[in-house]
């Protein structure tokens, strides 16, 4: 579908509640809060909220709203950057009168009364800028804060424009976003500066990773290791790309042990990994996915599947 029906729904509703996925990254927050800013700037009389658990390392981007169940009555609910319903943060999303999905992951779960899924988009933040572009004639406007948020989301999901999902359209949209008044240097500093404990854990990862003959690289961060370096499972996500420049690597996986589960972060330079992630309570993009397992025996099985994918990839 095109954006027209979504633009119409936004204009027709006075209360709009925007969700995104659990464990948010810059694109999830950038698209969610950026959309809020665009709607509020364009239509000041609308009540627009963003909801979900806050990620302590990303509160500089946006803070969430605390709303009541009753606020969902007759509300339009929009879910950003979330491929499947179990990963939507705050399950009250079902309490609104209409649901819209805006996403760039493979459409494995076709939820929503309306949806816009574009797997060629670099990020959902890029898609929200596209929504703004399509809605200009309908009164949609962008401001400095929306530009900051969407820029952060695009930067995050393109790896500072280094990932292959970066397209000509991405650069065209970014070229317009940077004309707005926000401090890009300060934003980069917030996005990429790390505490000393994270740096020390980074050193551990670079010493202890295992590179297999298949081209698969693995690292296991147990509860004991995280405790030793005073790093939370959420904070460890900042390290997921530090293995990407290792020569001969085809894919890599971080196993991060929590109290009652093991979080899995998967990245690839070619082998498709989201289909494997889907077998382990996860999913995502073909080259960037996440999963959840509950034992180290499951971790071994997942590694075997990833190895097979790396071996098959030429």
Image (cartoon, rainbow, N blue to C red):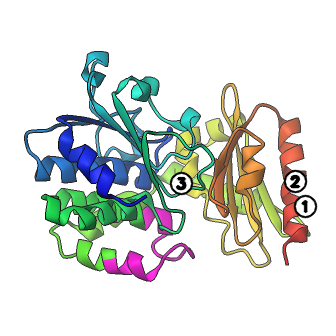
Do labels 2 and 1 touch, CB within 8 Å?
yes
Identify the residue shown where x is 49% and y is 69%: 158
Specify whether 214 is left or right of 32: right
**Dot 1 surroundings within 10 Å: few (below 14), some, or many (20 or more)?**
some
Residue 46, quarter of the rendered image: top left
Q: Quadrant of the C terminus?
A: bottom right
Mark seen at residue 308: 1
Label 2: element kind:
helix
Mark seen at residue 238: 3
Specify whether 247 is left or right of 182: right
Specify whether 72 is left or right of 105: left
**Magenta residues, as a range?**
155-172
Which residue is outermost to the bottom? 168
> Is 224 or 311 nearer to us in this picture?
311
Q: Is residue 169 magenta?
A: yes
* First-in-chain label (1 vs 3): 3
Residue 266 in the image, given as x and y percentages of width and height = 69, 55
- Give the Cα distance between marks 3 and 2: 25 Å
> Is 31 or 127 nearer to us in this picture?
127
- Give the Cα distance between marks 1 and 3: 27 Å
Specify whether 73 is left or right of 124: left
Mark seen at residue 305: 2
């Amino acid at each position: 579908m095109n954006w027209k029906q979504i633009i119409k729904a936004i204009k027709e509703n006075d209360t709009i509640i925007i969700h995104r996925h659990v464990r948010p990254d810059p694109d999830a927050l950038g698209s969610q809060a950026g959309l809020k800013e665009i709607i509020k700037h364009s239509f000041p009389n609308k009540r627009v909220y963003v909801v979900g658990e806050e990620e302590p390392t990303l509160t500089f981007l946006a803070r969430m709203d605390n709303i009541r169940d009753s606020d969902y009555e007759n509300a339009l609910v929009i879910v950003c950057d979330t491929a499947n319903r179990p990963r939507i943060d705050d399950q009250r999303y079902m309490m609104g009168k209409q649901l819209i999905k805006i996403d760039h992951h493979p459409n494995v779960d076709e939820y929503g009364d309306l949806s816009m899924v574009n797997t060629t988009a670099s990020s959902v933040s890029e898609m929200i800028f596209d929504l703004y572009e399509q809605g200009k004639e309908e009164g949609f406007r962008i401001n400095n804060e929306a530009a900051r948020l969407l820029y952060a989301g695009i930067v995050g999901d393109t790896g500072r424009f280094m990932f292959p999902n970066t397209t000509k359209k991405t650069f065209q949209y970014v070229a317009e976003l940077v004309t707005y008044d926000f401090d890009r240097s300060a934003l980069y500093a917030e996005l990429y500066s790390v505490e000393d404990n994270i740096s020390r854990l980074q050193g551990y990862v670079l010493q202890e990773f295992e590179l297999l003959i298949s081209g698969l690289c693995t690292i296991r961060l147990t509860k004991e290791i995280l405790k030793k370096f005073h790093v939370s499972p959420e904070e460890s996500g900042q390290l997921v790309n530090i293995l990407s420049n290792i020569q001969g690597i085809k894919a890599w996986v971080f196993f991060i042990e929590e109290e009652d589960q093991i979080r899995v972060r998967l990245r690839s330079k070619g082998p498709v990994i989201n289909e494997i992630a889907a077998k382990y309570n996860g999913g995502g993009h073909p080259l960037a996915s996440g999963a959840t397992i509950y034992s180290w025996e499951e971790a071994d099985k997942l590694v075997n599947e990833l190895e097979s994918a790396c071996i098959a990839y030429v």
